[in-house]
Image (cartoon, helix red, strand yellow):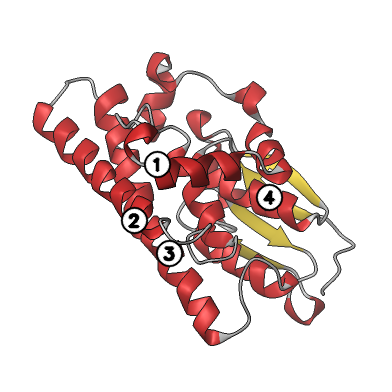
């Protein structure tokens, strides 16, 4: 197993996508240093961060002990999870069949659960005008996705069988289920998975990091101006 002597820099804010990586690093038990990126104050648009994350989004990492001993930066939470899984040989199978199983559910979260839950959050909590069609559209789609997870977890403990980066990716997006208009009692297999995952020590610590910096976005109009309605920047 690969050892790590220098800390991995984690550019982070306490959001579901940020939690994916803090959980993974805690599970791995490798040294890392938090670099807070206050997305409500526009720190993600600073030129120094753009060099690390061209999409102006966190999380991102800089690993000073990258391939060939040279530093490497990685952005996009799914890509970071895969990189760390490959490097340290944990939570991401080495065999092609096992890895494909994990990848399917990782990409399912990246392309489905995360974006749809994010839209549900937006239209249910932050939109200045409550649009019933939008609220119903995304609330119902999250409900459908929860149903997919519930069926998947009927005959296995975790999404890809063994606990993996797929679970680390999905869990933070299920945590705010109430804000998504969902009731876990409607999904008993998902509820069991959620409760068991939530009790893992690394998960507990991973989601606690930076909570003192969080503010209620619904009451922070300045942050909403920064976060919502962004356009291309020169």
Are the residues flagged by discs 3 and 2 in contact, CB closer than 8 Å? no
Residue in the image at 48% along x and 36% along y:
175
Mark 1 vs 3, N-terminal side = 3
Residue in the image at 57% along x and 49% along y:
20
Are the residues flagged by discs 4 and 3 in contact, CB closer than 8 Å? no
According to the image, label 4 marks what residue? Answer: 10
Check residue 231 in the rendering and tell me which mark sits there, or answer none: none
According to the image, label 3 marks what residue? Answer: 105
Check residue 188 in the rendering and tell me which mark sits there, or answer none: 1
Q: Nearest the camera: 29 or 15? A: 29
Per the model, the C-alpha gap separating discs 2 and 4 is 34 Å
Residue 10, x across and y down, in percent = 68, 50
Residue in the image at 65% along x and 68% along y:
85
Check residue 151 in the rendering and tell me which mark sits there, or answer none: 2
Residue 31, x across and y down, in percent = 83, 53
Q: Nearest the camera: 56 or 188? A: 188
Say if 206 sits above or below 165 in the image.
above
SS for dot 2: helix
SS for dot 4: strand
Q: Nearest the camera: 12 or 169? A: 169
Say if 96 sits above or below 164 in the image.
below
Mark 4 vs 1, N-terminal side = 4
Crowding near the residue tagged with mark 4, few <14, some 14–19, many ≥20 C-alpha atoms within 10 Å: many
Are the residues flagged by discs 4 and 1 in contact, CB closer than 8 Å? no
Per the model, the C-alpha gap separating discs 3 and 2 is 13 Å
Looking at the image, which residue sits at the far bottom?
A: 96
Mark in the foreground, 3 or 2: 2
Are the residues flagged by discs 2 and 4 in contact, CB closer than 8 Å? no
Crowding near the residue tagged with mark 1, few <14, some 14–19, many ≥20 C-alpha atoms within 10 Å: some
């Amino acid at each position: 197993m690969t050892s790590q002597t220098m800390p991995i820099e984690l550019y982070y804010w306490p959001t579901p996508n940020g939690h994916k990586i803090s959980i993974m690093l805690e599970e791995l038990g490798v040294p890392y240093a938090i670099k807070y990126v206050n997305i409500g104050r526009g720190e993600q648009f600073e030129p120094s961060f753009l060099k690390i994350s061209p999409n102006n989004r966190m999380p991102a990492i800089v690993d000073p002990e990258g391939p060939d001993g040279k530093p490497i930066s990685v952005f996009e939470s799914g890509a970071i999870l895969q990189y760390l899984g490959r490097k340290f040989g944990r939570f991401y199978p080495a065999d092609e069949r096992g890895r494909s199983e994990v990848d399917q559910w990782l990409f399912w979260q990246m392309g489905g659960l995360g974006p749809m839950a994010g839209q549900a959050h937006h239209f249910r909590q932050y939109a200045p005008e409550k649009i019933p069609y939008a609220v119903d559209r995304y609330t119902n789609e999250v409900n459908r996705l929860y149903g997919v997870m519930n069926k998947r977890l009927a005959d296995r403990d975790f999404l890809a069988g063994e606990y993996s980066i797929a679970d680390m990716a999905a869990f933070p997006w299920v945590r705010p289920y109430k804000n998504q208009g969902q009731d876990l009692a409607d999904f008993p297999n998902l509820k069991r998975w959620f409760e068991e995952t939530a009790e893992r020590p690394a998960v507990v610590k991973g989601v606690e990091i930076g909570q003192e910096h969080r503010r209620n976005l619904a009451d922070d109009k300045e942050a909403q101006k920064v976060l919502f309605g962004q356009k291309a920047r020169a």
